[in-house]
């Protein structure tokens, strides 16, 4: 297998100075996950990565990308010395993009971009070597890192692009230079940095600024801000495809729940087909439909991709379904603890409400219980957006809602007394009460922003028994 980067190639790409004649097989920014042969990139974040260069080399790093030789590092250590590590990482990413013939898809959106990226990676891997972002590596260092890691013989690449503030998406899209750019949806997320949802839509639409000549945008036709996306596409001269229930070429005809899967009837161009998605929720069918439009946009085989979609497996913390064995039966956890906003919260509660009872083997009464944590970055409307969850129709099918965090106190107060569980200041405070809250046959949702720490609750529920199996995905 050829090297990902040689010293000469990396020096040429970055304008830096290489010490030694080294080659690397991967790239790492974290010594905890570094593999032998990786190029360690000494980024400055919460801590200065230069403080960990010696440790990285001791663990077998093939070289380190630095601005200087750190203390404790031998004079003959394999280094790539540059003026600015972040800029050099971006240069590596741009050089990797330039040297490959891969068809690149870039995905953004307020909700569902990580799951859609994973769907695409699964579907395209069956048709050629496919490179995709790890986890949610979608920011100013995650995008160039993903690009810099791309093998030169990749046939496809799927790049996730996120944002917190205006002006972040376009520069990352220009680095990715996609042939296809997708906007999954637009929702009230990061409102503290934008005047309104239309402003968020314009920022998401900026992904089209990176499109290669002849590229195409894949846009959600069903959202209120569809016209904003259309206006931006017209302004940028970008060809675009619409997907959704109100679209024509890529149209969602129907969805239904069957066991632990969602079945969807769709039109994809001239073809009508059925999709099987190992996750519960119509929103997943929508994301899958948009993903198939992306597959078409890069010239891959759409019917074949639709078949492979049935093999897609969940991402931990984004709706993974975990059955926990208890004495006398079991319970089911819907682990959606990675992120939350009003749109994804509504979708997750809808999934909880629609999840079939576990059956007689599980024991118990099959109660549906939600642990909901704070939703971050909602700006001045945060109190009303949390309280507004009490009006969701899905709550009628949910027995008890426990609320975690100061913002969720607004929901706690708005819930009807019959469904109001306890309010906790922090996720860790819930753990002692789990044995009394939960029992055999229960279906439990844990949903909140990452900062709310609801993964602690998921881990606590796991400790009540032992994990039997995992399937499906919510977000």
Image (cartoon, helix red, strand yellow):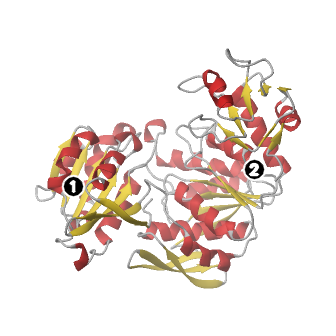
What's the residue at 49%, 79% (across, down)? Answer: 264
Question: Circle 1: is it few (<14), some (14-19), or many (20+) Cα within 10 Å?
Answer: many
Q: Foreground: 469 or 248?
A: 469
Disc 1: which residue: 401
What's the residue at 51%, 66% (across, down)? Answer: 313
Secondary structure type for disc 2: loop
Question: Where is residue 345 shown, x and y percent of the image?
Answer: 36, 55
Residue 441 visible in the picture: no
Q: Foreground: 81 or 187?
A: 81
Disc 2: which residue: 177
Question: Where is residue 367 shown, x and y percent of the image?
Answer: 20, 67
Q: Residue furthest top?
A: 71
Report whether 326 appears left or right of 52: left
| Cα distance between the residues tagged 2 and 1 | 44 Å
Report whether 430 appears left or right of 315: left
Report whether 215 appears left or right of 384: right
Q: Which mark is residue 271?
A: none
Q: Is residue 421 above or below residue 362?
A: above
């Amino acid at each position: 297998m050829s090297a990902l980067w040689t010293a000469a190639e990396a020096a040429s790409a970055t304008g830096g100075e290489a010490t030694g004649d080294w080659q690397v097989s991967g790239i790492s920014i974290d010594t905890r996950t570094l593999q032998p042969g990786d190029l360690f990139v000494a980024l400055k974040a919460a801590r200065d990565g230069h403080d960990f260069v010696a440790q990285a080399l001791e663990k077998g790093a093939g070289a380190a990308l630095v601005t200087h030789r750190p203390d404790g590092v031998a004079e003959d250590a394999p280094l790539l010395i540059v003026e600015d590590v972040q800029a050099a990482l971006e240069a590596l990413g741009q050089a990797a993009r330039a040297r490959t013939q891969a068809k690149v898809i870039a995905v953004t959106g307020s909700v569902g971009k990580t799951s859609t990226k994973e769907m695409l990676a699964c579907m395209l891997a069956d048709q050629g070597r496919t490179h995709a972002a790890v986890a949610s590596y979608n920011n100013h260092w995650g995008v160039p890192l993903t690009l810099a890691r791309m093998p030169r013989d990749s046939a496809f690449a799927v790049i996730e692009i996120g944002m917190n503030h205006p002006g972040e998406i376009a520069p990352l899209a220009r680095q990715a230079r996609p042939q296809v750019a997708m906007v999954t949806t637009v929702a009230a997320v990061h409102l503290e940095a934008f005047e309104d949802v239309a402003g968020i839509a314009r920022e998401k639409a900026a992904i089209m600024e990176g499109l290669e000549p002849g590229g195409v945008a894949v846009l959600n036709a069903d959202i209120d801000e569809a016209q904003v996306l259309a206006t931006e596409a017209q302004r940028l001269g970008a060809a675009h495809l619409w997907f959704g229930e109100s679209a024509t070429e890529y149209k969602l005809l129907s969805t239904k729940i069957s066991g632990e899967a969602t079945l969807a009837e769709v039109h994809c161009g001239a073809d009508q087909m059925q999709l099987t998605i190992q996750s519960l929720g119509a929103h997943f069918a929508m994301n899958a439909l948009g993903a198939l439009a992306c597959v078409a946009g890069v010239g891959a085989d759409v019917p074949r991709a639709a078949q492979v979609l049935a093999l897609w497996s969940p991402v931990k913390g984004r709706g993974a379904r975990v059955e926990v064995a208890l004495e006398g039966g079991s319970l089911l956890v819907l682990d959606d603890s990675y992120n939350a906003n009003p749109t994804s919260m509504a979708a997750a509660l809808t999934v909880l409400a629609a999840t079939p009872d576990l059956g007689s083997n599980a024991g118990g009464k099959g109660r549906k219980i939600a642990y909901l944590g704070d939703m971050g970055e909602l700006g001045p409307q945060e109190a009303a957006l949390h309280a507004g969850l009490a009006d969701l129709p899905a709550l009628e099918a949910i027995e008890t809602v426990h609320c975690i965090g100061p913002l969720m106190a607004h929901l706690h107060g708005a819930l009807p007394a019959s469904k109001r569980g306890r309010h906790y200041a922090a996720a860790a405070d819930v753990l002692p009460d789990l044995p009394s809250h939960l029992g055999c046959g229960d279906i439990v949702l844990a949903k909140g922003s990452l900062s709310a720490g609801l993964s602690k609750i998921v881990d606590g529920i796991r400790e009540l028994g032992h994990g039997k199996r995992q399937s499906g995905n919510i977000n």
